[in-house]
């Protein structure tokens, strides 16, 4: 099997809540997504996507995905998409770093391998460890009361794991953690993620102030 064509499209994915906020005043109001299609000479084709969370969350950005693909695609035409190791070697040889731009190619090739072999991707990757996956819900950084209200709504939908976006003012972050933990069931999981927004002093202060609560601090 050989890759004959790689195409990409830019798609705006609106956020249900309208805006997603995290530390240091960062936010996004839409996910800038890149959808990739890989076609082969055997008629098989597959899709994958990449949507970095803005440009200040990780060392990645949406337009970088598409520019990276223009660098990578010419080198991949004619390659066997089911030879995942070779695909990644070709990509690493053509473009140093930028794994986020390579990710949708890798994902689509794994799915093509699954179609070609008749096996699920999780089987190809080593098998399943569980039958069900309990999803978590990320809670955008807002006032303590607003975050608690959102958790209450998502809890009613069946969510049992929540990740708070903190990393703002340490005093308010302490209030956020207390307000949200107070409305959760004892079995619910709460994570407070500061996204590098705290100094060491603030981190120590917050951890000390919530030491009596069942909460993970990231």
Image (cartoon, helix red, strand yellow):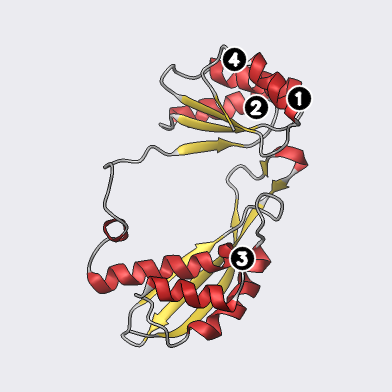
Q: Which mark is residue 211?
A: 4
Q: Position of residue 10 (x, y in %)?
A: 60, 69
Report the residue marked by disc 2.
146
Q: Pointer 4: residues within 10 angstroms few (<14), some, or many (20+)?
A: few
* Residue occupying the point 44% across, 18% down: 185
To which quarter of the image does residue 203 belong?
A: top right
Q: Pointer 1: residues within 10 angstroms few (<14), some, or many (20+)?
A: few
Q: Nearer the viewer, mark 2 or mark 3?
A: 3
* Residue occupying the point 27% across, 61% down: 120
Report the residue marked by disc 3.
98
State the separation of the CA atoms marked 2 and 1. 26 Å
Q: Pointer 2: residues within 10 angstroms few (<14), some, or many (20+)?
A: some
Q: Could you tell me if the residues under marks 4 and 3 are in contact, i.e. CB atoms within 8 Å?
A: no
State the separation of the CA atoms marked 4 and 3. 39 Å
Report the residue marked by disc 1.
201
State the separation of the CA atoms marked 4 and 1. 15 Å
Mark found first going from the N terminus, 4 or 2: 2
Find numbered disc 2 in the image and state the secondary structure of the residue it sits on. Answer: helix
Position of residue 157 relative to residue 18, above or below, is above
Q: Is residue 112 left or right of residue 56?
A: left
State the separation of the CA atoms marked 3 and 1. 33 Å
Which is nearer the eye, 175 or 78?
78
Which is nearer the eye, 19 or 24?
24
Mark found first going from the N terminus, 4 or 1: 1
Find numbered disc 1 in the image and state the secondary structure of the residue it sits on. Answer: helix
Q: Position of residue 189 (x, y in %)?
A: 47, 26
């Amino acid at each position: 099997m050989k890759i004959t064509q790689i195409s990409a499209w830019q798609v705006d994915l609106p956020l249900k809540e309208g805006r997603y906020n995290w530390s240091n005043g960062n936010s996004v109001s839409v996910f800038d997504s890149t959808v990739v299609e890989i076609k082969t000479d055997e008629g098989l084709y597959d899709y994958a996507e990449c949507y970095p969370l803005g440009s200040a969350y990780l060392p990645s950005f949406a337009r970088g995905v598409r520019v990276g693909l223009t660098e990578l695609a010419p080198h991949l035409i004619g390659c066997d998409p089911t030879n995942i190791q070779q695909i990644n070697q070709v990509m690493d040889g053509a473009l140093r770093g930028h794994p986020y731009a390579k990710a949708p190619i890798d994902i689509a090739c794994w799915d093509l391998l699954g179609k070609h072999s008749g096996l699920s991707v999780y089987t190809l990757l080593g098998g399943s460890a569980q039958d069900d996956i309990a999803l978590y819900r990320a809670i955008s950084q807002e006032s303590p009361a607003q975050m608690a209200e959102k958790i209450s709504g998502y809890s009613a939908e069946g969510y049992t794991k929540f990740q708070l976006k903190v990393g703002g003012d340490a005093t308010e972050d302490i209030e956020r953690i207390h307000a949200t933990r107070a409305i959760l069931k004892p079995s619910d999981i709460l994570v407070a993620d500061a996204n590098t927004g705290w100094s060491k002093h603030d981190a120590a202060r917050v951890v000390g102030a919530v030491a009596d609560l069942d909460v993970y601090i990231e």
